Every structure is written in C-alpha cells, then in structure tokens.
Amino acid sequence: MRGLMFGSAVLSLAIAATASADVLFNNFGAGDSYNTGSGWTISDGSPINTDWDQGDAFTVSGGNYFLDSIEAAIGLVLGQNRVFIDIYDDAGGQPGSVLESVTIEDQMGPFGSFNAPIVGNFSGSTLLMDGMTYWAIASSDSNSWLAWNQNDQGDIGPHASSPDGAPWNVGPNTRGAFRINGTLPAPGALALLGLAGLAGTRRRR
C-alpha cells in the first residue's frame, strides 16, 4: 500500500511539473477549415445497419508529451449527439491497444455545414513518446450516424476502418481533419515517472 501511495504521489508531481503546451499533429487549414462535403462514416445500428469505426494515425515528434486533447471535425447526420474517441498505440502499422478514451457530447453540428471542431479533453497523464505512431479512432452510439470530415489540405496518411468489429483495414487515404494537443514535461518530470514505476515494481514484490 505504501508503494502504491508513493507511486501515485510521484505521478501527480510529474504531471504537475509540466510546461509548454504544443500541437503534436494538425491538418486543419487556415481558420480550422476542412472539407465540409466529404467525410468518413461513423455509425452503429440503423439506418446504415453497419457499425463503422474510423480513424487515422499520427506520429509524435520533438519530444515526449502528455496527451491533453483532441479537436476534430465530426458532424452529426442522425441519432445521438455523442462520439467516442480512443487513442491507440500502434501495433505493426495498425491500431493496437487503447491508451485513453474520451466521450464528447452535444458538440457536433450538422454534417455538411462548417462547424467549429469538437473538443475532447483527456486526463493529461498518458505519455506519448517521441517518434512513435498513435491512432485516433472514433466510434458512435447505438443507432447513430456521424461523419468525420476529411481535411482540405491534401493530407494523406494511414487510415483505419473496421465494419462490425472486423479486423482493421488500413491503408493510405485522406485523413479526417483533427488536431492533437500535448504538454511537454518540464525537466525532471520523466525522472519522477521513473520513480513511480520503480515504486510500483517494489510494491508488487
């Protein structure tokens, strides 16, 4: 128990000891522009009767960052005004394991209109590593139909889709418009995280 409490305290200190919020990925145009007429279908149930999960890869550069938030151009076609976005690590060029999830409610405007990006705020404790690839994957509620607007900057990259829980279909394609924001840990913060891991190891013994 002492090891767990110590590890939690050190993790809190590491997160608090941060500085320099940065954009880790962004393919919006000027004024957060995107393609209002084209998007990737996100659905679950009627009227499409197919569960479509869709998302895109992004690669971190310039350092290790705590994941702060995602902004995405996702519009509502029918159903609940709610979307789930998961951040996955990469496993051999496709989504691997979920690192963190966020639910975004009542922010989507109607698909086909120019709406402000929806915003999902993460815990700020998930560390994204320099040079590593991650995936932002969106899914929807039951009987909902959404669309992730494609970017208007000609940005093409790894895109993943899965109908009805099938294995991921991954290939180069026009990515949805989104932005990933993170916070660069202050000097010494990563060392504190190492201490937290060491404390956890000792506790398990």
Image (cartoon, rainbow, N blue to C red):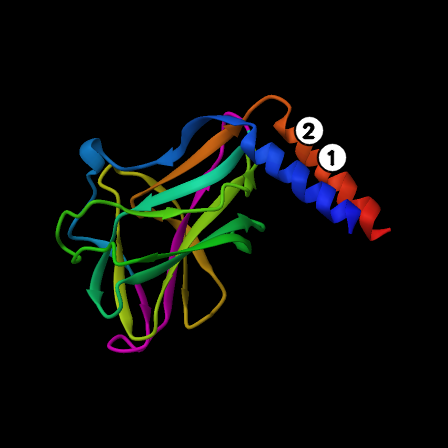
Circles 1 and 2: CB distance less than 8 Å? yes
Which residue is found at the position 48% from the left and 40% from the top? 67
Which numbered marker is on residue 195?
A: 1
Q: Secondary structure at mark 2?
A: helix
In three-dimensional space, the C-alpha distance between marks 1 and 2, rounded to whole angstroms, equals 6 Å
Q: Amino acid at mark 2?
A: Ala
Q: Amino acid at mark 1?
A: Leu
State the image coordinates of residue 119 (x, y, percent, origin top left): 32, 46
State the image coordinates of residue 202 (x, y, percent, origin top left): 83, 45
State the image coordinates of residue 43 (x, y, percent, origin top left): 31, 68
Q: Residues within 10 Å of mark 1 (few under 14, many from 20)?
A: some
Q: What segment is highlighted magenta in the picture?
A: 42-63
- What residue sits right under mark 2 in the picture? 191
Spot the residue most to the top.
Answer: 187
Q: Is residue 66 left or right of residue 36?
A: right
State the image coordinates of residue 88 (x, y, percent, origin top left): 51, 51
Q: Secondary structure at mark 1?
A: helix
Front position in the image: 2 or 123:
2
Q: Is residue 184 left or right of residue 151?
A: right
Q: Residues within 10 Å of mark 2 (few under 14, many from 20)?
A: few
Front position in the image: 122 or 153:
122
Which residue is found at the position 24% from the left and 77% from the top? 47
- Inspect the magenta stretch and tell me whether residue 48 lies in it: yes
Placement of 156 over or under 112, stated as above or below: above
Q: Is residue 12 left or right of residue 153?
A: right
